[in-house]
Amino acid sequence: MEWEAVIGLEVHVQLATKTKIFSGASTAFGAEPNTQACAIDLGLPGTLPVVNEEAINMAIKFGLGVNAEINKVNVFERKNYFYPDLPKGYQTTQLDKPIVGAGTVDIALEDGSVHTVRIHHAHLEEDAGKSLHEDFAGMSGIDLNRAGTPLIEVVTEPDMRNAKQAVAFARKLHSIVTTLGICDGDMSQGSMRFDVNVSVRPKGQEKLGTRTETKNLNSFRFMEAAINKEIQRQIEAIEDGFEIIQETRLYNGDTGEARSMRSKEEANDYRYFPCPDLLPVVIDDSRLDKLRAEMPEMPEVRKARFIEELGLSNYDAEILSGEKATADYFEAAAKTSGDAKLAANWVLGELAKTLNQNDTEIKDSPVSAEMLGGLIARIKDNTISGKIAKQVFDALWKGEGSTADEVIEKKGLKQVTDTGAIEAIVDEVLAANQAQVEQYQAAEEAKRGKMIGFFVGQIMKASKGKANPGMVNQLLKKKLG
């Protein structure tokens, strides 16, 4: 039997406000435990929450960014449940009247087609604290610094059919919130957390299967692995005659292990009711118009501009526009170098490879966009070859110079473009390899293309990589006949 997966996401996006959603306590990451939780965050008697206006504005911007309905009257409610890191015994959230209604996000698939994922809604809420289970002699500790940090929870329709689609959506959402500046997107710090709902059904069947929820995935790689593992688990269980139980699951990205956390056979009674301390939030047209005017260039628009104005391919434009930090870096490098296509090749090639090898984010790259742009400019004007350029890039990465020009000068890497000097090297190599010259001259035209590479390699070796490759090829063809 052929099976089909049905996937929906719930994404917690931590908003980049300086203070919490209902108090003036700091949201800065990395402080000592329990030093940034005030009386309001703890819900102590006599405290009164006040809505952070910037959190409201950020939620509206998100709604505008996904072409969603903005509910002009939205209400905060209390979701009642006990958990050790929820000191108030309830979470202030939104249920019946969330701030953001239905919207859409388009994702590009590997075959070049576009798939639309529907947003059911996005609501504002406060984050809980964090339970810590290490180094406490078998006990758990509670850090309440995160309690009260503003979130929007983005809930999708079950519109994705495989892990790659889910990851493509997650990446697109990451791109949208970072472009808007409403979230720093740092998943290692919990700025975005993904809950994945997965079910399977026979292909062609309309009725949905029983779903499971895998919580708190904080990387695209872990998400893809967790989804694939859960799809396979469910298919194997059904084919072996077992029923899928609705449950909450956890996935350990380091070990690749998944396990059940708790069953969800019955709906939890959270006893929602409107928060008595907070009035409904009313959004007028003037606020919407002001925020709409402040919207930055969104990823889809930026991608189209990269294609139309800079001449990039659809593939390159899709990747480069997908993350704000990468898009900004590329544009700065392209402007400095004067060659967008070459800048795209370097950002997606040598830079991306080196960042990956060193587990470094592009914002932390020791080679700035301007430094890379200066390097590309030296390739363009034939000061250095592409091969030498990689040596210069490596030196810049290691901090052996602040500009490409400085490294080229210091290491004596300037390309040899003097025809006489190159011709002398060519003559020397040909004289030392007469047998290969005769084989080349006796070969058919179709085979000569590969054979000439031997001579080019010998010449570049003799010139220590400094000979201009174009001039080398031109002189070789002339002399070999």
Image (cartoon, grey):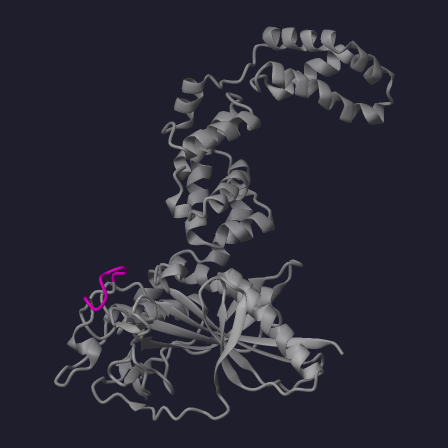
Determine if the magenta segment contains residue 29: yes
Determine the image quadrant of residue 3: bottom right
Image: 474 above or below 308:
above
Image: 404 above or below 206:
above
Depth check, front residue: 193 or 476: 193
Q: Quadrant of the N terminus?
A: bottom right
**Is residue 134 shown left or right of residue 105?**
left
Residue beneath the point at 44% across and 38% down? 333
**Is residue 272 shown left or right of residue 259?**
left
Q: Main secondary structure of the magenta part?
A: loop
Image: 386 above or below 94:
above
Image: 303 above or below 27:
above
Question: Which residue of the protein is positioned furthest toward the front in this rendering?
Answer: 137
The answer to whether residue 481 is seen in the rendering is: no
The answer to whether residue 452 is seen in the rendering is: yes
Q: Position of residue 331 (x, y in %)?
A: 44, 43
**Is residue 19 shown left or right of residue 356?**
left
Determine the image quadrant of residue 402: top left
Determine the image quadrant of residue 463: top right
Mark count: 0
Depth check, front residue: 254 or 148: 254
Q: Quadrant of the C terminus?
A: top right
Q: Which residues are magenta?
A: 28-35
Q: Position of residue 67 (x, y in %)?
A: 45, 70
Q: Position of residue 270 (x, y in %)?
A: 36, 90
Residue beneath the point at 52% across and 76% down? 259
Q: Position of residue 448 (x, y in %)?
A: 80, 23
Determine if the magenta segment contains residue 481: no
Question: Which residue of the protein is positioned furthest toward the left in this rendering?
Answer: 46
Depth check, front residue: 296 or 53: 53
